[in-house]
Image: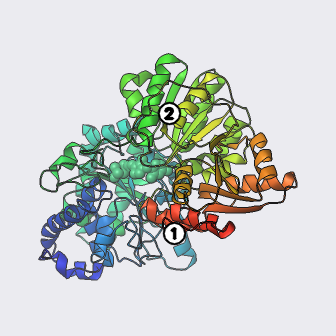
Amino acid sequence: MKKRYELLDRIDSPDDLKQLGPDDLIRLSAELREFIIDIVSSNPGHFGASLGVVELTIALHYVFNTPEDRIIWDVGHQAYVHKILTGRKKNFHTNRKYKGISGFPRPSESPYDAFGVGHASTSISAALGIALASQHLNKPDRQVVAVIGDGALTGGLAFEGLNNAGSENSNLLVILNDNEIAIDPNAGAIKEYLIDITTSKTYNRFRKDIWNILGALSKLGPNAQKYAQQIEHGVKSMLLKQSNLFETLNFRYFGPIDGHDILHLTEILRDLKEIQGPKLLHVKTIKGKGFAQAELNQTAFHSPGIFDKETGKIFSASAGEKKPPRFQDVFGETLLELARRNDRIIGITPAMPTGSSMKIMMDEMPERTYDVGIAEQHAVTFSAGLAIEGMIPFCNIYSSFMQRSYDQAVHDVALQNLPVVFCLDRGGLVGDDGPTHHGVFDLAFMRSIPNMIVSAPMNEEELRNLMYTAQLKNHGPFSIRYPRGRGMMADWKKPFREIPVGKGRLIRKGTDIAILSIGTAGNLAAEAINRLEDSGISIAHYDMRFVKPLDEDLLHKVFKRFRQVITVEDGSLAGGFGSAVLEFMADHAYQCQVKRLGVPDRFIEHGTQAELYRECGFDAEGIVNAITSLVKPKVLSKAI
Ligand SMILES: Cc1ncc(C[n+]2csc(CCOP(=O)(O)OP(=O)(O)O)c2C)c(N)n1
């Protein structure tokens, strides 16, 4: 039976919310937490971050006039309360499901989603653009709010936005949601700075005095309020300009305040609406607030999967049966093994120690691993610096976040032919995170960079051996991309074997048609071939391993022997592996029918990986169809 919520059941929009009295807001916060716990425990998604901003989100929609006023969420993984309050409560159970609502804000989904997000540190730049556009459009009263976490603030883009905003007189409010954690404990000096500013007694006494004067004067009317603001600004800028980072950047800094005190929050947001110019409100929150296990184990409850809402026990996907490992764990364990043998190896992760499993090495060798914050650009140039002095950096970046570091890969690494090993995790369609996180462009964008080796293992053992090969000698830049999720091999920890760079391998002999695959999409091809076992079609299968350098000897043989070729990749068809094969064919004037399977030239939404492979036509069935459309089955079996 559907659970009843006394207040939440009445709310489908911020207008409904505004009908509540301030005292109801506390009860509504509790109901929202219960609603989220109820749904996210059985339909997995991001969890702790939304619980931490329940009060903040309610306060924002209570005080501001959304959607006319704009709220821009950074990353957007914390926007579940926002979604529920802005008309998506009834659909919330479809969150991240195929054809359901997105796990991130999307303007195409709702007018309340002011800006599309998924990657970190964009909110301030976007909000500044929106604020200045509002001035150009003669909407001076519009309020624009960016909500950014302390983790996302470690990204350089956030500082580029602050720097620019500080010199523009826009009506911009940045809310710093400081919960002292990213996915893993936040990294870098900013973290210390935020703790200092929160705990500094002198600073806080001063701030309180100013706030009290401001409060007292504001009761005397608008002129007194303006006067108070001027005093406050004058005194503050005199005393704080030197000591407060945000004030130095021309922001007026307010806080830190308790982000779970909803009444105080609404009061302060009301006051801030009246203050012109760029301002920053520092809010302290607890990630996972209201769910004990999530507060205790914030990293695991960032995105926990299915869990027991009573006990907080996370049901790990591998519970019970022995499953093949996740690719990230093969990476993590192999890196540690290699680092034990080769003391030049250094591990670098931009804020994803747990997600990438670099934590395995970090725990044993903290001095040889660096979590550099959510700073992919820096991670790559930092790796280049390590490499130029003779270290062998293994720089692990999720494929879609690597898009940020393209120039660094070109200019800082490849141009100097430095031996940075790029381990690109979450390559291909990642599933329920959707288009912001699909890692589908890397094969195409990496292969256009001179000197770059571009590889993608078909299984765990190959991943291990590619990592081993990459550190054996100086190959220049070497990228290894692998997908989200589990592989096929329970028994993957075999002795290391060097893989000849630029050499593919024959998986299966055949005479009628050749399939050339790259990466784990090769397993879908192998499954398709198995399904066609009794069809009478003789199918050759090659795992190319490298998009660059391409195995030209192998391709010459294939194009001499076969008139029909299918390429399969979990990546963009535009410019990807299949394109490379076509270029080879044209360059050598082979005439052959080539069918390319992969991700078409459009953004693919969220869903399970299997659903998305099917949509793109390179699941096993899609590959079977492609084969049978090119070669007529000689014996039709019921397997087809
Ligand atoms: C460019 C980029 N790199 C990495 C990530 C992965 N990521 C998602 S949320 C997150 C942590 C964000 O921390 P914070 O901003 O403090 O928000 P919180 O989850 O603590 O509320 C990271 C690293 C991302 N979304 N975008």
Mark 2 or mark 1, which has the lower sequence index?
2
**Residue 95 position by quadrant:** bottom left
Residue occupying the point 29% across, 54% down? 305
Q: Residues within 10 Å of mark 1 (few under 14, many from 20)?
A: some
Choose between 413 and 93: the one closer to the eye. 93
Q: Position of residue 428 (x, y in %)?
A: 53, 54
CB under 8 Å between discs 2 and 1: no
**Does the numbered disc 1 mark a residue whose Cβ is under 8 Å from ligand 1?**
no
User: What sort of colour scheme is used for the picture?
Assistant: rainbow
Q: Position of residue 480 (x, y in %)?
A: 58, 39
Q: Secondary structure at mark 1?
A: helix
Does residue 400 lie above or below 329 as drawn? below
* 316 horizontally vs 619: left or right: left
In the rendered image, which residue does mark 2 sit on? 348
**Which label lies toward us, 2 or 1?**
1
The amino acid type of the residue labelled 1 equals Glu
In the rendered image, which residue does mark 1 sit on? 615
Q: Position of residue 277 (x, y in %)?
A: 45, 63
Q: Residues within 10 Å of mark 2 (few under 14, many from 20)?
A: many
Q: Which mark is residue 89?
A: none
Distance, label 2 to label 1, CA atoms, is: 35 Å
The amino acid type of the residue labelled 2 equals Ile
Q: Secondary structure at mark 2?
A: strand
Quadrant of the rendering where the N terminus is positioned: bottom left
**Residue 506 position by quadrant:** top right
Q: Looking at this view, name the residue that lies furthest to the right.
A: 589
Does residue 628 lie above or below 317 as drawn? below
